[in-house]
Image (spheres, grey):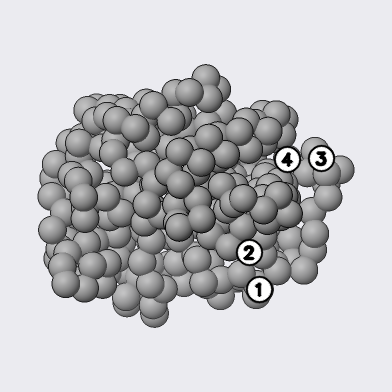
């Protein structure tokens, strides 16, 4: 594994312009049609070689990927795979926010979580990405909802200066952590930071159990930095192909258009062979009319 230190982080510039150019609000619409890019969440790939997987996803029709961080990739090999395939690394998702949540009552656990996020900033910058996905808190028997709210905000505020220095944004995700359970609250949570560096990473599939994705999109609006998609239906929950569950994809698409979202739409589904990945691209293109 190549560890990215602060000096490398400050010096890293390769790919940044390309990644930023495809960030939210920076992608030009063509003839009034929203400009969305298809990406794949590589949650199971944390060490190299990256090239075979990148080549597979590129051939399938994806334009970008999101990686887990911290990870065991060799930086040079990873960047070479990125550059050879043209598959952009648009951001990273934290890999330790469940085990080391920012809401934990143990200061040592919190510091381990903070250290991981700081490394995620460095990794994301080096890859040319624009966002770090952060699950902000976990509510459980030892952490109340209010404690999760206050602790996570206090600790994210400590991270904002480094995020600003890096040019990387903190993208808070709603997930099955018994926290941020309504779109109104999620919007308020983001607004209370009073910082353009903190926004929302909206996962369409995660809210179907207790809400309507299109309503969340309308409420979050300009706060949305990135989008994750997966299907949802009972009884198997997320174990359905895109378009074969309960989600009203036409309503989701229209809501994204209504709020002016422009940027990455990342499939968070299982990695398969070339035909399986082509099918995911085809479904994304059909459901959201991505040209």
Number of other residues with Cα within 10 Å of mark 3, as a class: few under 14, some 14 to 19, many 20 or more: few
Residue pointed to by mark 2? 81
**Of labels 2 and 3, the one closer to you:** 3
Rendered-image quadrant of the N terminus:
bottom right
Q: Residues within 10 Å of mark 1 (few under 14, many from 20)?
A: some
SS for tag 1? loop
Q: CA distance from mark 2 to mark 4?
A: 16 Å
Quadrant in the rendering for residue 222:
top left
Q: Which of the two discs, 1 and 3, labels the residue nearer the N terminus?
A: 3
Q: In the image, residue 48 lies at what x, y percent?
A: 66, 73
Q: Earlier in the sequence, mark 2 or mark 3?
A: 3
Quote the CA–CA distance across marks 2 and 3: 20 Å
- CB under 8 Å between discs 1 and 4: no
Is 166 located above or below residue 236 in the figure? above
User: Looking at the image, which residue is at 50% across and 43% down?
Assistant: 148
For image coordinates 45% across by 29% down, the residue present is 190
Whole-percent x, y for residue 129 in the image: 59, 45
Q: CA distance from mark 1 to mark 4?
A: 22 Å
Judging depth in this view, the residue of 160 and 75 nearest the camera is 160
Tag 1 near tag 2, CB within 8 Å: yes
Residue behind mark 4: 13
Is residue 120 something that shows in the picture? Answer: no
In this view, the residue in front, 7 or 35, is 7
Q: Element at badge 2?
A: helix
Q: Point out the tag, 1 or 4, that comes first from the N-terminus.
A: 4
Q: Residues within 10 Å of mark 2 (few under 14, many from 20)?
A: many
Task: Return the residue at label 3.
Answer: 11
Mark 4 and mark 3 residues within 8 Å of each other at the beta carbon: yes
């Amino acid at each position: 594994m190549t560890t990215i230190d602060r000096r490398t982080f400050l010096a890293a510039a390769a790919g940044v312009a390309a990644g930023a150019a495809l960030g939210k609000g920076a992608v030009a619409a063509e003839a009034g049609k929203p400009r969305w890019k298809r990406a794949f969440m590589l949650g199971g790939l944390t060490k190299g070689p990256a090239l075979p997987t990148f080549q597979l996803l590129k051939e399938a029709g994806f334009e970008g990927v999101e990686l887990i961080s911290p990870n065991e990739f060799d930086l040079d090999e990873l960047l070479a795979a990125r550059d050879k395939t043209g598959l952009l690394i648009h951001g990273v998702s934290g890999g330790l926010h469940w085990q080391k949540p920012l809401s934990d009552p143990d200061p040592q656990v919190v510091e381990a979580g903070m250290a991981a996020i700081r490394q995620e900033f460095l990794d994301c910058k080096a890859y040319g990405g624009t966002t770090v996905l952060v699950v902000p808190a976990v509510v459980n028997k030892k952490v109340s909802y209010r404690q999760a709210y206050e602790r996570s905000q206090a600790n994210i505020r400590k991270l904002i200066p480094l995020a600003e220095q890096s040019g990387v944004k903190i993208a808070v995700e709603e997930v099955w952590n018994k926290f941020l359970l309504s779109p109104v609250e999620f919007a308020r949570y983001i607004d209370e930071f009073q910082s353009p560096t903190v926004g929302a990473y909206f996962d369409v599939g995660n809210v179907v159990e207790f809400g309507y994705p299109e309503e969340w999109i309308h409420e979050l609006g300009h706060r949305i930095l990135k989008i994750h998609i997966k299907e949802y239906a009972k009884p198997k929950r997320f174990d359905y192909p895109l378009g074969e569950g309960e989600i009203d994809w036409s309503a989701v698409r229209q809501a994204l258009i209504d709020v002016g979202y422009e940027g990455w739409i990342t499939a968070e589904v299982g990695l398969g062979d070339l035909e399986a990945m082509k099918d995911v691209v085809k479904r994304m293109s059909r459901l959201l009319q991505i040209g």
